[in-house]
């Protein structure tokens, strides 16, 4: 009964807020009534009527979820404008991009807005996932929403990847060639997956039409559906997790404040800031466009998009089967199953969970920062020269991770959530270093090189 009374009170507050914006017309079914209904049952129901004061603080969530929504809106708006000028055929795709940039008013700006929104979105969604993980906000009623969030991340990566090919220049053509080539290492169905992703045996007209169709129809619909479901699940969980675990009891309403204006005004400020940053970047830096795609001449080096570059770097050091099949599958399964592990205590709320969590996390980050570059150099200048790379290397790495986990358990005796967090940080920082190495420290022939001079390191 207490929960029902609380729900009724929140509903009445919401109705009073809506009534102050759109007074109900005495005549039913008017435009004012329709606007009121849309706001009351759609917009306000995507957020709880009241939220905890501690969750409104910017430093708790950094507004990353709202930033993602704004960036997706910018992508859809600019994408619709780009569709009016784009011709999805190998003969005309590149020329239509040139025509858009050079011959249409604000054409280059619209394309730059689309480009920067897409790249910033990937980073923002990754940071949002990290925020949820490092505050333990994947427990309890938020378990399945974590899985939905992972689906959104995959959808955003798919949107970026399918859009990457559309300019049909050397950079995009060979990046897609590399990424789809990775599918060939999947045992049994690799060739079929590769042919399906390319729309044929080679990258050509079928690939461009397939990517364009997915980029403009299938992926946006999936993202819209998942976003609505994601926001609804946040609403059902009464907002984001509180940074103070002692305040997370359902019946403790002493620190509750109205969503409007306390939360929505902050979200509006964050959204406007994101729009301003994207517009500034679009005004200062045009979206890159290289030479027209040439299937007969690969650039040196040919690299995957930055968000897949870590896997390409892994391919240099490990067997392709390990680098692009086994490790990604294990990582994906680990993230999906994470909320459903049995935890003795479901630590959530504060950043990095606890003092022990912060200590073990910092230690894991330092180990990864030191060991990962060292392993890259050892493999580059010794193991690859002596034939010791590949399967022996993965054995050494597995033994090192096991030793680190054992030492961590004996020294700090962390809770399971703290232990999982430390291992996650170890893998995360290691993969980030691999990505940075691939993007900035790989030159011709994918040899190590200094980024500012292009000479061998």
Image (cartoon, rainbow, N blue to C red):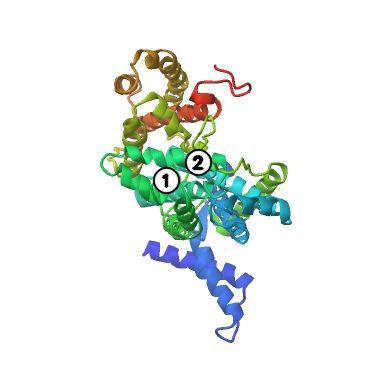
The image shows residue 448, relative to residue 277, as above or below, that is: above
The image shows residue 58, relative to residue 398, as above or below, that is: below
Foreground residue among 5 and 212: 212
Q: Do the CB atoms of the residues marked 2 and 1 lie less than 8 Å apart?
A: yes
* Quarter of the image that includes the N terminus: bottom left
Q: Is residue 319 left or right of residue 65?
A: left
Residue at left offset 49%, top offset 38%: 307
Question: In the drawing, what numbered circle is on residue 202?
Answer: 1
Identify residue for label 2. Answer: 295
SS of the residue at dot 2?
Answer: loop
Crowding at mark 1 (Cα within 10 Å: few <14, some 14-19, many 20+): some
SS of the residue at dot 1?
Answer: loop
Looking at the image, how many numbered discs can be counted on the residues? 2
Q: Is residue 2 left or right of residue 119?
A: left
Residue 128: % across, % down: 49, 43
Q: Is residue 183 left or right of residue 99?
A: left
The image shows residue 153, relative to residue 105, as above or below, that is: above
Q: Is residue 63 visible?
A: no
Q: Is residue 49 visible?
A: yes
Foreground residue among 135 and 128: 128
Residue with the most extreme left position: 188
């Amino acid at each position: 009964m207490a929960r029902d009374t609380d729900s009724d009170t929140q509903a009445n507050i919401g109705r009073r807020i809506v009534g102050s914006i759109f007074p109900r017309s005495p005549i039913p079914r008017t435009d004012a009534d329709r606007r009121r209904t849309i706001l009351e049952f759609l917009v306000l129901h995507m957020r709880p009527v009241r939220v905890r004061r501690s969750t409104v603080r910017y430093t708790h969530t950094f507004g990353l979820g709202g930033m993602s929504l704004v960036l997706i809106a910018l992508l859809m708006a600019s994408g619709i404008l780009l569709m009016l000028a784009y011709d999805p055929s190998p003969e005309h795709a590149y020329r239509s991009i040139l025509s858009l940039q050079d011959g249409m008013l604000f054409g280059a700006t619209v394309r730059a807005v689309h480009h920067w929104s897409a790249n910033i979105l990937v980073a923002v969604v990754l940071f949002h996932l990290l925020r949820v993980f490092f505050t333990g906000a994947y427990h309890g009623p938020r378990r399945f929403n974590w899985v939905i969030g992972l689906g959104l991340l995959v959808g955003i990566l798919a949107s970026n990847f399918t859009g990457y090919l559309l300019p049909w220049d050397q950079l995009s053509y060979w990046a897609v060639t590399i990424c789809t080539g990775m599918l060939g290492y999947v045992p049994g169905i690799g060739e079929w997956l590769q042919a399906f992703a390319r729309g044929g045996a080679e990258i050509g007209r079928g690939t461009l039409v397939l990517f364009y169709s997915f980029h403009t129809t299938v992926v946006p619909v999936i993202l819209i559906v998942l976003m609505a479901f994601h926001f609804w699940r946040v609403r059902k969980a009464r907002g984001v997790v509180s940074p103070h675990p002692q305040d997370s009891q359902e019946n403790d309403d002493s620190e509750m404040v109205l969503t409007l204006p306390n939360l929505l005004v902050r979200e509006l400020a964050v959204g406007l800031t994101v729009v301003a940053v994207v517009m500034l970047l679009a005004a200062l830096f045009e979206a890159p466009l290289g030479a027209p795609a040439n299937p007969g001449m690969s650039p040196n080096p040919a690299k995957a998009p930055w968000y897949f570059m870590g896997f390409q770097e892994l391919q240099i050091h490990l067997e392709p089967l390990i680098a692009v099949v086994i490790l990604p599958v294990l990582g994906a399964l680990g993230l999906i199953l994470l909320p459903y592990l049995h935890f003795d205590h479901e630590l959530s709320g504060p950043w990095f969970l606890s003092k022990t969590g912060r200590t073990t996390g910092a230690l894991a980050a330092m180990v990864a920062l030191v060991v990962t570059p060292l392993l890259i150099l050892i493999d580059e200048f010794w193991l690859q020269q002596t034939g010791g790379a590949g399967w022996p290397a993965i054995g050494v790495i597995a033994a090192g991770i096991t030793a680190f986990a054992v030492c961590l358990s004996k020294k700090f005796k962390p809770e399971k959530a703290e232990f999982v967090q430390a291992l996650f940080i170890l893998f995360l920082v290691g993969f980030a270093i691999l990505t940075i190495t691939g993007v900035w420290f790989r030159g011709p022939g994918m040899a190590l090189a200094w980024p500012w001079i292009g000479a061998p390191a």
